[in-house]
Amino acid sequence: DIVLTQSPTLAVSLEQRGTISCKTSQNVDNYGISFMHWYQQKPGQQPKLLIYEGSNLASGIPARFSGSGSGTDFTLTIDPVEADDIATYYCHQSRDYPRTFGGGTKLKLK
Amino acid sequence: EVQLVESGGGLVQPGRSLKLSCLASGFTFSNYGMNWIRQAPGKGLEWVASISSSSSYIYYADTVKGRLTISRDNAKNTLYLQMTSLRSEDTALYYCVRQGYRDWFAYWGQGTLVTVSS
């Protein structure tokens, strides 16, 4: 199984940049595509797709969210962080079965 | 607008069965792969099962293989999860999720809560 590792929490100040990392135990790239995706989950809500295939912004997602990385190292960046961004963020790989998620990174205000 | 509405959750005793349903609307259901993903209370996300658009390909997490069965009825725009031999560790909010083109999880339902307890 491909294991995805995220830091449990990240404390940021409003209007600053927040970066969330996701490291995978195996390469999740294939045919030049990164099979890495990011989701946001606010308390009491279902997760929402933010970024697909490493760096593509999902429909309706603000441009302050961006994704980067390849291979086994990926990053979700929020710049600038707004109060509405306080949530838990999950990475997910679809390179192989079983599909796996990172443990989630809870974004907190400093 | 894509809508996924789960139903069928509830309180069930260990060892018993339950069947979840997910009614899809706002898109051509028969064109998309579908998934069940669960989240135990206060925990992270766990992928449970996937089914391709025509039911030709089905995959399960090892933790549920042999006990949970994913299926779909394209004529009824409905996804199912038959759950048998339920255990306390199956207690979770179960989400119905539509796939994107290369298997990202594009749309999520609100979830239905399954509680396994005596």
Image (cartoon, coloured by chain):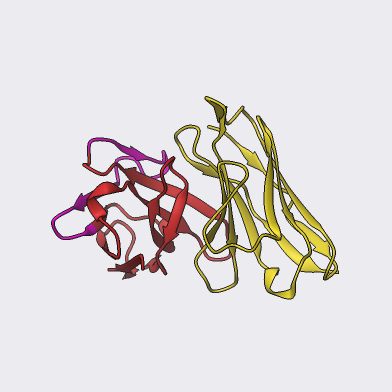
Residue A32, given in percent of the width and then of the height, sits at 57, 27
Answer above or below: position of B69 versus B5. above
**Residue A106 sits in quarter:** bottom right
**Residue B82 sits in quarter:** bottom left
Q: Does the magenta stretch include residue B118?
A: no
Q: Is residue B58 magenta?
A: yes
Query: Which residue is at the far left?
Result: B75
Answer above or below: position of B66 versus A72. below
The residue lying at 29 percent from left, 59 percent from top is: B27
Residue B88, given in percent of the width and then of the height, sits at 42, 59
| Residue A87 seen from this side | yes
- Chain letter for the yellow part: A
Q: Give the range drawn in magenta.
A: B56-78
Q: Judge left or right: residue B35 versus residue A101.
A: left
The picture's colour for chain B is: red
The residue lying at 54 percent from left, 64 percent from top is: A60
| Residue B89 seen from this side | no
